Image: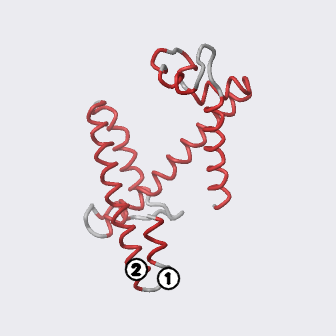
Amino acid sequence: MPLAIVLGMLDYCMLNTIAATAIPDGFSTNAKYIANLDKLNGIEKFPVLYSVTQKFGTYGSFLIWTAIFCALSSSMIGFYRALANIVKSLSDAKLLPQRYNAISKDGTPRKAIFLIMALSVVIPFIGKNVTGWLTDATSISATIAYAYMSYCCILVSSKKNIISTKFLLLSV
């Protein structure tokens, strides 16, 4: 797991570095390039894709699309697993029907996963604006939840003298 985190960090750093160094013909600075993205067409409109293709050719393009596919696939798998566990916990607490807390032989809450899949299939049909509103509301909710959990960690850590409160406040 730590190796995956380090490799993911290096991947993002390298992509940002490559994107910052590749400037299409006709632009003198990266700032001018970014300011005119809406006027460009094709792959030039996407700085990272353009820069990787410009620097590494077809092989680089293949690698970047493979990296995008892997990132999306792994994030979707993580999303379904985490959300399925949340649905199972809500079902355990009797906030959702009890059928969603059932665990299969391999330890996954399959009915919860199928519920999430069913909701995920329906959401695109409710419209682009509503999906945007849901995303905005979720972002705000996640920020509040993260702040609350950080506050709880600070309280617990300071009471148990696990780590200095000053250090925790700096890290938040």
Q: Which residue is mark 2?
A: 156
Kindly indicate whether the residue at mark 1 contacts the one at mark 2 (C-beta within 8 angstroms). Answer: yes
| Mark 1: amino acid | Ile
In the rendered image, the quadrant that contains the C terminus is bottom left
Q: Is residue 62 left or right of residue 41?
A: right
Residue 125 in picture, x, y percent from top left: 31, 31
Q: CA distance from mark 2 to mark 1?
A: 8 Å
Within 10 angstroms of label 2, few (less than 14), some, or many (20 or more) residues?
A: some
Instruction: Determine the residue positioned at 37% across, 67% down.
Output: 149
SS at circle 1: loop
Q: How many marks?
A: 2
Residue pictured at 62% horizontal, 19% vertical? 24
Give the side of residue 136 with respect to residue 114, left or right: left
Residue located beneath label 1 in the image: 162
Q: Nearer the viewer, residue 93 or 128?
A: 128
Q: Residue furthest bottom?
A: 160
Q: Residues within 10 Å of mark 1 (few under 14, many from 20)?
A: few
In the drawing, what numbered circle is on residue 102?
A: none
Q: Of the residues under marks 2 and 1, which one precedes in the sequence?
A: 2
Q: Is the residue 121 above or below the residue 4 in the image? A: above
Instruction: Provide residue 34's location: percent of width, then percent of height.
Output: 51, 25
Q: Position of residue 133 (x, y in %)?
A: 27, 39
Q: Position of residue 138 (x, y in %)?
A: 32, 48
Task: From this view, report whether residue 91 is shown above or below residue 39.
Answer: below
Of 59 and 16, the residue lying toward us: 16
- The amino acid type found where label 2 is placed reads Val
List the single residue furthest toward the front.
Answer: 28
Q: Quadrant of the N terminus?
A: bottom right
User: Left or right: where does residue 121 sit relative to residue 46?
Assistant: left
